[in-house]
Structures are given as C-alpha cells and as structure tokens.
C-alpha cells in the first residue's frame, strides 16, 4: 500500500514539467497535503452508528449493551463498560455492541445495563452478576429509541 502510494505520488507529482519555480514549490508542498487529506477522509466512515445515552442523574454510571433476550442476566465475563459522568452524554457505538451499523437493532431488542460506578469499583464482577447489582435495564429496538425521542435517558 505504501509502495503504491509512493509510485502514484511520483507519477502525479512530476515537478520537472512545471515551468516556474514558484509553481514547483507550491505543488511540492500542496500536493502531499492534498494526498494526506484524501487518505484520512477514506479512513473514517461517513456515518457513525450509535445510540445516544444521557445521564441526568448525580451518579457516575457505567453501562454496556448486548443482544441477550430472552435471557436478562449480566454477561459471564466482565464486559467493557462505558463510563458516563453526571449530566454527560455519550454514544454507545455499533462497535461497542458488536453489531456493525446496528443492523440487528432494526429487528432485535438490545439490552442496555446501567450500573453504579462505585458498585463496579467495590465488588467483583461475579458478585455484581450473582446479586444483579444494576441500577436499570433497558430493552430497546430502533422503534423504541424513536419513541424515546432518539436518546436513552437515565434515570
């Protein structure tokens, strides 16, 4: 890939054909910047797929989401939790859930577990799971999210 990029830069940036030194200097600096900009816009998707979560409580909370219905128990292994401070908004992205572009969200219910950060820090995941130490559980799909105004709001 890097070799291909160098070949294409050398092919398109043949400065010997330019007549003035000012033009050569301009192309010498502008062209690589232009190429880098094009490369970076290709690396990032045009659209992020995520669910906005708003914490309107005074607690710092942790959350994670997964497709588990009809089971409503917490994950066996400790999941990667996203932290939300009081009065803060985050996005639970498709990569956080393991659902590319939230395709399953169209038809399946996503379960979002909300936990108190102090509980997460004070207890083992096994204790949290066994005693079901959660603050709230949401079971939503795309239509539910639309009905909720486009955001999951805790509490």
Image (cartoon, rainbow, N blue to C red):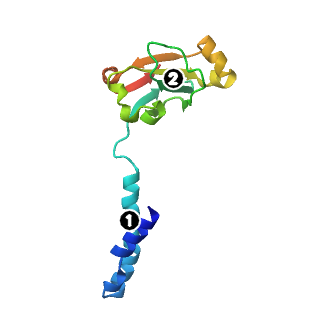
Picture coordinates of residue 92, whole percent (x, y): 45, 32
What percent of the width, then of the height, locates residue 78?
60, 26
Q: Residues within 10 Å of mark 2 (few under 14, many from 20)?
A: some
Residue drawn at (45%, 67%) of the image: 3
Quadrant location, the N terminus: bottom left
Q: Which residue is mark 1?
A: 35
For residue 138, side relative to residue 15 (left or right)? right
Quarter assignment of residue 30: bottom left
Q: Which mark is residue 78?
A: none
Please tell me how many numbered marks the rendered image carries. 2
* Distance from the alpha carbon under mark 2 to that under mark 1: 46 Å
Q: Quadrant of residue 105?
A: top left
Q: Position of residue 72 (x, y in %)?
A: 49, 13
Q: Is residue 84 visible?
A: no
Q: Is residue 120 left or right of residue 136?
A: right
Residue 36, horizontal then vertical, whole percent: 41, 63
| Residue under label 2 | 57
Q: Which of label 2 and label 1 is nearer to you?
A: 1
- The correct choice, above or below, for 78 with respect to 48 in the image is above
Q: Residue at x 54, y 16 (%)?
A: 135
Give above or below for 34 relative to 109. Answer: below
- Give the secondary structure at mark 2: loop
Label 1, secondary structure: give it: helix
Residue at the spot x=46%, y=30% of the render?
Answer: 97
The answer to whether residue 41 is above or below residue 137 is: below
Q: Nearer the viewer, residue 78 or 128?
A: 78
Q: Is residue 12 above or below residue 116?
A: below
């Amino acid at each position: 890939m890097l070799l291909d990029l160098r070949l294409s830069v050398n092919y398109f940036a043949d400065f010997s054909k330019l007549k003035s030194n000012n033009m050569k200097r301009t192309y010498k600096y502008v062209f690589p910047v232009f190429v880098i900009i094009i490369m970076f816009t290709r690396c990032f998707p045009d659209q992020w797929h995520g669910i906005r979560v708003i914490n309107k409580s005074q607690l710092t909370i942790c959350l994670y989401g997964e497709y588990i219905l009809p089971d409503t128990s917490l994950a066996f292994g400790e999941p990667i939790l996203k932290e939300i401070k009081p009065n803060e908004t985050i996005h639970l992205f498709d990569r956080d859930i393991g659902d590319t572009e939230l395709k399953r969200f169209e038809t399946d219910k996503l379960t979002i577990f909300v936990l108190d950060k102090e509980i997460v820090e004070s207890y083992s995941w096994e204790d949290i799971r066994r005693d079901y130490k959660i603050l709230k559980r949401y079971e939503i799909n795309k239509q539910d999210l639309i009905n909720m105004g486009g955001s999951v709001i805790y509490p």
